[in-house]
Image (tube, rainbow, N blue to C red):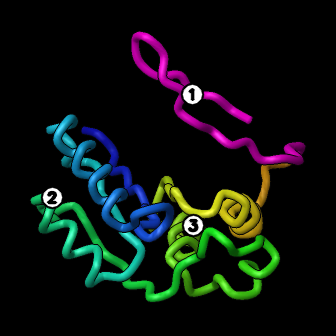
Amino acid sequence: MTDKITIAIDAMGGDNSPSKNIEGLSIFLRKNKKVENIHFNLFGKEKDIRVYLNKFKINDKNIKIFNCENIVSDEETPLTAIKNSKNTSMWNCISSQVVGDADISLSAGNTAVLLVVSRMILKMMEDVSKPALAGLWPNNKSMNVVLD
Protein backbone atom coordinates (compact mmCIF):
# COMPACT_ATOMS: atom_id res chain seq x y z
CA MET A 1 0.00 0.00 0.00
CA THR A 2 1.31 3.42 -0.96
CA ASP A 3 0.62 6.56 1.04
CA LYS A 4 -1.42 9.28 -0.59
CA ILE A 5 0.57 12.30 -1.80
CA THR A 6 -1.17 15.62 -2.26
CA ILE A 7 0.46 18.23 -4.49
CA ALA A 8 -0.75 21.83 -4.25
CA ILE A 9 -0.35 23.80 -7.47
CA ASP A 10 -0.57 27.58 -7.85
CA ALA A 11 -2.43 27.33 -11.15
CA MET A 12 -2.27 31.10 -11.69
CA GLY A 13 1.51 31.46 -11.24
CA GLY A 14 3.72 32.16 -14.23
CA ASP A 15 3.38 33.18 -17.85
CA ASN A 16 0.31 31.99 -19.77
CA SER A 17 -1.36 30.66 -16.67
CA PRO A 18 -3.43 28.73 -15.98
CA SER A 19 -3.10 27.22 -19.47
CA LYS A 20 0.59 26.24 -19.19
CA ASN A 21 0.22 24.91 -15.65
CA ILE A 22 -2.77 22.75 -16.53
CA GLU A 23 -1.00 21.59 -19.70
CA GLY A 24 1.97 20.57 -17.54
CA LEU A 25 -0.36 18.60 -15.29
CA SER A 26 -1.81 16.95 -18.40
CA ILE A 27 1.66 15.91 -19.61
CA PHE A 28 2.48 14.48 -16.17
CA LEU A 29 -0.76 12.48 -16.08
CA ARG A 30 -0.21 11.12 -19.61
CA LYS A 31 3.32 9.98 -18.80
CA ASN A 32 2.41 8.53 -15.39
CA LYS A 33 -0.63 6.30 -15.82
CA LYS A 34 -0.69 4.91 -12.27
CA VAL A 35 -1.30 7.99 -10.16
CA GLU A 36 -4.23 6.86 -8.04
CA ASN A 37 -2.26 7.73 -4.88
CA ILE A 38 -1.47 11.27 -6.08
CA HIS A 39 -4.01 14.02 -5.53
CA PHE A 40 -3.79 17.57 -6.84
CA ASN A 41 -5.11 20.70 -5.18
CA LEU A 42 -5.30 23.50 -7.74
CA PHE A 43 -5.38 27.08 -6.47
CA GLY A 44 -6.65 29.85 -8.72
CA LYS A 45 -9.63 31.13 -10.62
CA GLU A 46 -11.89 28.08 -10.69
CA LYS A 47 -13.75 29.09 -13.83
CA ASP A 48 -10.47 29.46 -15.78
CA ILE A 49 -9.01 26.25 -14.36
CA ARG A 50 -12.07 24.24 -15.40
CA VAL A 51 -11.80 25.58 -18.98
CA TYR A 52 -8.27 24.15 -19.27
CA LEU A 53 -9.06 20.89 -17.47
CA ASN A 54 -11.69 20.37 -20.18
CA LYS A 55 -9.40 21.56 -22.99
CA PHE A 56 -6.68 19.08 -22.01
CA LYS A 57 -9.26 16.36 -21.23
CA ILE A 58 -8.11 15.87 -17.65
CA ASN A 59 -10.26 13.64 -15.47
CA ASP A 60 -10.74 15.60 -12.26
CA LYS A 61 -11.23 12.50 -10.08
CA ASN A 62 -8.04 13.23 -8.09
CA ILE A 63 -8.29 17.02 -8.39
CA LYS A 64 -9.76 19.54 -6.00
CA ILE A 65 -9.99 23.21 -6.99
CA PHE A 66 -9.67 26.00 -4.44
CA ASN A 67 -11.07 29.22 -5.89
CA CYS A 68 -8.73 32.20 -5.44
CA GLU A 69 -9.65 35.33 -7.37
CA ASN A 70 -6.41 37.18 -6.53
CA ILE A 71 -2.98 36.43 -8.00
CA VAL A 72 0.60 37.62 -7.46
CA SER A 73 1.79 39.59 -10.47
CA ASP A 74 5.25 39.28 -11.99
CA GLU A 75 5.88 42.96 -11.22
CA GLU A 76 5.04 42.68 -7.53
CA THR A 77 7.86 43.10 -5.03
CA PRO A 78 8.23 40.77 -2.05
CA LEU A 79 7.41 43.65 0.31
CA THR A 80 4.11 44.52 -1.40
CA ALA A 81 3.27 40.84 -1.76
CA ILE A 82 3.62 40.27 1.98
CA LYS A 83 1.12 43.07 2.53
CA ASN A 84 -1.26 42.20 -0.31
CA SER A 85 -0.97 38.49 -1.09
CA LYS A 86 -2.81 36.77 1.75
CA ASN A 87 -5.75 35.82 -0.46
CA THR A 88 -3.80 34.90 -3.59
CA SER A 89 -3.45 31.55 -5.27
CA MET A 90 0.25 31.45 -4.34
CA TRP A 91 -0.31 32.23 -0.63
CA ASN A 92 -3.13 29.72 -0.30
CA CYS A 93 -1.17 27.06 -2.19
CA ILE A 94 1.81 27.35 0.17
CA SER A 95 -0.40 27.65 3.27
CA SER A 96 -2.06 24.35 2.42
CA GLN A 97 1.14 22.59 3.51
CA VAL A 98 0.99 24.13 6.97
CA VAL A 99 -2.56 22.99 7.65
CA GLY A 100 -1.78 19.50 6.33
CA ASP A 101 -3.82 19.67 3.13
CA ALA A 102 -0.74 19.21 0.91
CA ASP A 103 2.65 17.54 1.04
CA ILE A 104 4.23 19.65 -1.70
CA SER A 105 3.45 23.04 -3.20
CA LEU A 106 4.42 24.18 -6.69
CA SER A 107 4.35 27.61 -8.29
CA ALA A 108 5.81 29.00 -11.49
CA GLY A 109 4.97 32.50 -10.32
CA ASN A 110 7.07 35.45 -9.18
CA THR A 111 10.20 33.77 -7.75
CA ALA A 112 11.15 36.53 -5.30
CA VAL A 113 7.65 36.61 -3.84
CA LEU A 114 7.50 32.81 -3.76
CA LEU A 115 10.72 32.66 -1.75
CA VAL A 116 9.71 35.34 0.76
CA VAL A 117 6.15 34.09 1.23
CA SER A 118 7.34 30.47 1.54
CA ARG A 119 9.90 31.44 4.15
CA MET A 120 7.24 33.35 6.10
CA ILE A 121 4.62 30.61 5.95
CA LEU A 122 6.71 27.44 6.09
CA LYS A 123 9.47 28.77 8.37
CA MET A 124 13.02 27.39 8.33
CA MET A 125 14.57 24.26 9.77
CA GLU A 126 16.80 24.75 12.78
CA ASP A 127 20.36 25.74 11.79
CA VAL A 128 19.30 26.49 8.20
CA SER A 129 19.50 30.21 7.50
CA LYS A 130 18.77 30.38 3.77
CA PRO A 131 16.34 28.51 1.55
CA ALA A 132 17.53 26.84 -1.64
CA LEU A 133 15.86 27.05 -5.02
CA ALA A 134 15.71 23.79 -6.96
CA GLY A 135 15.50 23.71 -10.70
CA LEU A 136 15.49 21.00 -13.34
CA TRP A 137 18.48 21.14 -15.65
CA PRO A 138 18.23 19.05 -18.81
CA ASN A 139 21.20 16.92 -19.84
CA ASN A 140 21.80 14.51 -22.72
CA LYS A 141 20.12 11.58 -20.96
CA SER A 142 17.51 13.05 -18.66
CA MET A 143 17.37 15.78 -16.02
CA ASN A 144 19.47 16.94 -13.11
CA VAL A 145 18.24 18.86 -10.10
CA VAL A 146 20.26 22.00 -9.46
CA LEU A 147 20.11 23.88 -6.16
CA ASP A 148 20.95 27.55 -5.78
* Number of marks present in the image shown: 3
Alpha carbon separation for disc pair 1 and 2: 28 Å
Alpha carbon separation for disc pair 3 and 2: 25 Å
Alpha carbon separation for disc pair 3 and 1: 21 Å
Label 1 SS: strand
Q: Is residue 80 left or right of residue 127?
A: left
Residue lying at 34% horizontally and 45% vertically, measured from the top left:
3
Q: Which residue is farthest top?
A: 140
Residue 97 at x, y = what percent? Answer: 54, 64
Per the image, the residue denoted by label 2 is 56
Residue lying at 28% horizontally and 79% vertically, measured from the top left:
48
Residue 67 at x, y = what percent? Answer: 37, 84
Instruction: Give the class, few, some or many, for how many residues have Cα within 10 Å of label 1's Cα (few <14, many ≥20).
Output: few
Q: Quadrant of residue 88?
A: bottom right
Per the image, the residue denoted by label 1 is 145
Per the image, the residue denoted by label 3 is 94
Check residue 82 for magenta coloring: no
Label 3 SS: helix
Q: Quadrant of residue 111?
A: bottom right
Question: Is there CB contact under 8 Å for labels 3 and 2?
Answer: no
Residue lying at 48% horizontally and 16% vertically, measured from the top left:
139
Residue type at mark 1 is Val
Residue type at mark 2 is Phe
Residue lying at 16% horizontally and 41% vertically, measured from the top left:
30
The vertical placement of 86 against 96, above or below, is below
Q: Quadrant of the C terminus?
A: top right
Magenta residue span: 127-148
Residue 38 at x, y = what percent? Answer: 29, 50
Which is closer to the viewer, label 1 or label 2? 2
Lower position in the chain sequence, tag 1 or tag 2: 2
The vertical placement of 39 against 83, above or below, is above
